Image (tube, grey):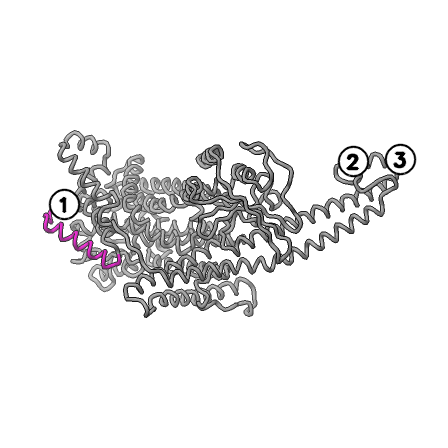
Amino acid sequence: MFSVSVPWALAVAKATELVAASGGMSTSDDGTSIALAAFVEEPGKLVPLAVVTLVAPGRARRLAAVDWALLGYAAGAGFTAAEDGARRLAPQGMLASLLGGDKGLDYSLNAWTAGSFRLWNSDGLLGRFMASGGPSPLAVGHHVSTMTVAMAVGLGIVLWRTGRPLGRVVAWVLPAVALVQVVVDHAAYNASVASLTSVSWLDSDDPLVYWLGAVWQVSGRGNNAIAYSVVLFGLCLLADARRRLRTGALGVTAGEAPRVPSMTAIGGPAFVRAPIEAVVALVVLSYSDLVVIARGYADRRMTRSQRMIEGRLTAAQVMAARRDAMAATTPGVEPTARRVFALITLVVWALTGLVCLWCGVVVAQAIGSSLLFGDSDSGFFAGLLDELATWWDSLGPTGQLLVTALGVMLLMSAGSTFALAMGAVGVLTWAAAHGHGLASFIHNPAAATSSYLSNVTPGQLAWDLLDFALTFIPGSVFGAGAHTIARTTARDMAATRTALRQAAAADRYAKDIPELFRQHEARKAAKQAAIEELAGSIPKNYSPSNFTRTQIEDTREMLRNQGHSKRIIEELDKKADAVSVARKELTDAGTRIGEAGGEKYLTEQGYHIPDEFRTDNVTVNGGTAPRGWADGMALSPDGGELVVSEYKGVTAELSRTPVNTRFEGKALQGSPAYARDHMLSDPRFAQYFHDHPEVWEGVKNGSIRLNAKTIYTRTPDLTEIGDQPFSLTPEVTQALQQAIDNL
């Protein structure tokens, strides 16, 4: 996200210029630097997040609220690295010198302590001069403002999923308020800078500027932005902790890890109990995770380097437990849920972007070329790049090498690899060396391109291409190489988590299946009673077969012709219906036993059943796989086998009536041809292979075996298995590939 957002800042800068030009303004106008910089940049920084939800909606739906915070921070930090990195490297203007003295602007990527701009300090000369003007305006960095909006989005998703009317209203209001707040703070701070570090612009007669200032004043002149961000981050932590608590064993990292105590004894309404549960869960789970990770670093049987490796692997397992918990608490049936999520994201983002652009143009035109008087430092990307290039050229070759080495050293000391540090610094130094050209391109792409092509020499073109390739094309020698490491404790932890998940699922089935068999016995007794009651009422010369669904109409007509009363015919109708209903309920009970027993067996054997193939997630045909669908699908623990499953309960057997297939004529249920045809007719297979291309490649090249597995659940303790290994025919492979491509 960070690496994508750095070049994306160039696109946002160009978009700002284009919007200004479409409104009859230039980048030097105060209206552009104040309004458009806020109304275009703030929603523009959210575009990479929107792209993530459109490209990977399933993954985005499973994100924790804190994940949204981190994505927002990374997106904003990338913008900061591009824009404010250039600002800090460029020579200081008069305003920057006044604000920061010899140190320049007090700014860093630290989100809550040093990551902000403040126009004056209360104990400084300018602060004493402006004492009557109220508190100094403050603008948080791009990383803080973008993270704030992203956290509001994450919490909005959590609130929407509560299903409560108030929660769903707040789910929409919270992100909207957060976006308005960061836009207002950004625009108002820029207005104060344009007013030569004063807030005299608040006295403007323009109604749009007045309302902008009024909202800014009420919200604390930007001074509360950090507090808002901290509060939202705390709420994200609490929401995620409670989600993880709800998953039981799925949220547990290790069997011996500290567990969250039960809060059921507290009692009281949910709105009182839920916050207490969240706080307790956050404290206990945080402590538990730290203990488990520390254990990975503390095994004295290993060398120091091995302990470092083991600790990082253990931390990865803790993160995996957290991801499992988030996935388990994500509602909806795939793939419909992810498609709806992506569609909503597209619509909301498009509307938000259009509204922000319209508001930005209106406010910018109201401000015009000058808010009050005077010029400020170059604050747009094009101007910053020009200044950066001038500074870079003044360093000379030796100074440029020293700056590059210093940047690499600082990034490596912060934990980056050498390849990553070289890449990041390389991008910045490339931008510095080509700053004049980039600035010209941002101002006028067509003219800059034409000028370059008409003046460049073959040698210069070759050098520029090599320069670009060495900077931006990944896979250099610095990133080559790999090594194998020991994974003992992390492997043990992974096995423990797998066992916990399987035990939790098996425990649920162990409770459900006996109850399903009891229900089956009750349905069986009800069916027998209904048959006996009907048999006792059947007139002479008739049999129970005359009162089936296919014969009841003819039987009713014959009874009327023979003079039977309307009341008797209606009673026979009701009793015949009761028999039909009892038969169907008995069949459904057996089907549910087969489904639960089949999934229990697969889970106990370590198979992974994708969510879309779980019987609980079938939303059509009354919750049972309809004709043409497979009963289920699962992957073996090692990923080397894909099972197309048929579930049979109690006395049910595979049908002996052949059915038509698309390519192989008639086939019996449970046969390889039957399984192949169901992989075509069941849309879940194409969607799953589309979303997991590595599985589809394994199926095609034969590294993943296919098996038509029939699971018979005869009693709570007796399960019979039938296996039919198979492979795909060329026709089926081609048809499945076409279905995948159509998605």
> Is 596 rendered above or below residue 296?
above
Question: Which mark, by number, is residue 120?
Answer: none
Give the SS element for disc 3. Answer: loop
Residue 414, quarter of picture: bottom left
Q: Type of residue at label 3?
A: Gln
Q: Residue at x 29, y 56 (%)?
A: 137
Give the SS element for disc 1. Answer: helix
Q: Which residue is mark 1?
A: 390
Residue 322, quarter of picture: bottom left
In primary-sequence order, the first of circles 1 and 3 is 1
Are the residues at dot 3 and dot 2 in contact (C-beta closer than 8 Å)? no
Q: Type of residue at label 2?
A: Glu
Are the residues at dot 2 and dot 1 in contact (C-beta closer than 8 Å)? no
Q: Which residue is mark 2?
A: 553
Q: Which residue is mark 3?
A: 562
Q: Nearer the viewer, mark 1 or mark 3?
A: 3
Q: Which residues are magenta?
A: 389-415
Whole-angstrom CA distance, mark 2 to mark 1, is: 94 Å
Can you see residue 317? yes
Residue 518 in the image: state x and y as whole percent. Answer: 68, 57
Give the class, few, some or many, for how many residues have Cα within 10 Å of label 3's Cα (few <14, many ≥20).
few
Instruction: Say if the magenta span includes residue 403.
Output: yes
Secondary structure that dominates the magenta span: helix
Residue in front for this viewpoint, 608 or 526:
608
In primary-sequence order, the first of circles 2 and 1 is 1
